[in-house]
Image (cartoon, grey):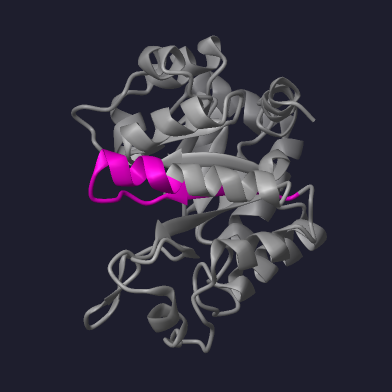
Amino acid sequence: MNCKKIILTLCLGLFALTGFAQPHILSHRGFYTNPKVDENSIDALREAQRLHHDMGLEACEFDVHMTADGELVVRHDNKIEGRLTCQGSKLAEIKAYTLPHGSKIPTLREWFQQAKRTPKFKLALELKSHPTPAKETEVVEKVVALAREMNMMDQLCFLSFSLHACKEFVRLAPGSYVILNSSNMNEPVTPAKAKELGFAAISYHLSVFMNHVKWIDEANQLGLDTYLWMCEDPYLIDWATAYGVTWITTDYADRMLPYAQQLAKDRKRLKKLRKSRF
């Protein structure tokens, strides 16, 4: 499938919001909160895949760093323990470490190998910030090369808090679905700017969107998707539905997904939410 077909499929299919549909659910760091497994571990990915199979979960998010010897690993925090870090240590040192619930920190290749078992399950790859723009470009190159080698591009979208990294994904993977992440309430990128930069979506902390609610309408009008995080309470699904948010990110997909699915069936309540906008 070529790049244009990929982005068209994502935008018009999975990543589209139509009518009174509830926001889609993006599970954060795989799915690790019930049962307790290590976040961003292969077990967390398997649990997310289970929710995909059993409950219709559409996507999960995970985080990527590059080690000191140029390997890609899946973990949220750079710091691991003591002097051990994702970006400052070598892969062999990182692989020797055992996470609290017994898992090992996976490589991106290992993550992709497991993810390929559910090809319709979408993955949001968050590239963590690295020390310099040049280093981030190198990491983006490696991520895109591995995704292409393993035929993972159809399953992936890319996101980062780094504006440079997002721009590099647009440049190095033309037509890919790129999301800018931000928790900065004072200087976030506007929907119009995100569109100009070639991004497909903006992912903002709830404090940003709640202080810039007009941006949700603006993003929808521009054909951009919106991601609201973190959403751990059904009230925020109501809020997101009222304002037309496309996706919510949550640690509790097993709770938020049934609520959102039930809300989608309640046409009367949906109409009231859209009318009231709180």
Q: Residue at x 63, y 43 (%)?
A: 156
Write down the quadrant of residue 14 in the picture. Answer: top right
Is 18 placed left or right of 227 in the picture?
Answer: right
Asked if residue 234 shows in the view, the reply is: no
Q: Nearer the viewer, residue 220 or 100?
A: 100
Q: What residue is drawn where x is 53% and y is 20%? A: 224
Q: Which residue extends farthest front?
A: 69
What is the x, y in percent for residue 245? 52, 30
> Percent from the top left, x then y, of residue 134?
29, 40
Marker count (numbered)? 0
Q: Which region is colored magenta?
A: 121-139
Q: Work out whether 205 lies above or below 41.
A: above
Q: 139 or 15: which is nearer to us?
A: 139
Residue at 60% x, 58% y is 253
Name the one closer to the observer, 221 or 137: 137
User: For this view, does 141 lie left or right of residue 208?
Assistant: right
Snapshot quadrant of residue 271:
top right
Residue 164 lies, with reference to residue 215, above or below; the image says below
In the rendered image, the vertical position of residue 167 relative to residue 236, given as above or below: above
Tell me which residue sits at (70%, 20%) in the image: 4
Is residue 127 shown in magenta?
A: yes
Q: Is residue 119 magenta?
A: no
User: Residue 25 location, x and y as percent?
Assistant: 61, 46
Which quadrant does the N terminus fall into?
A: top right
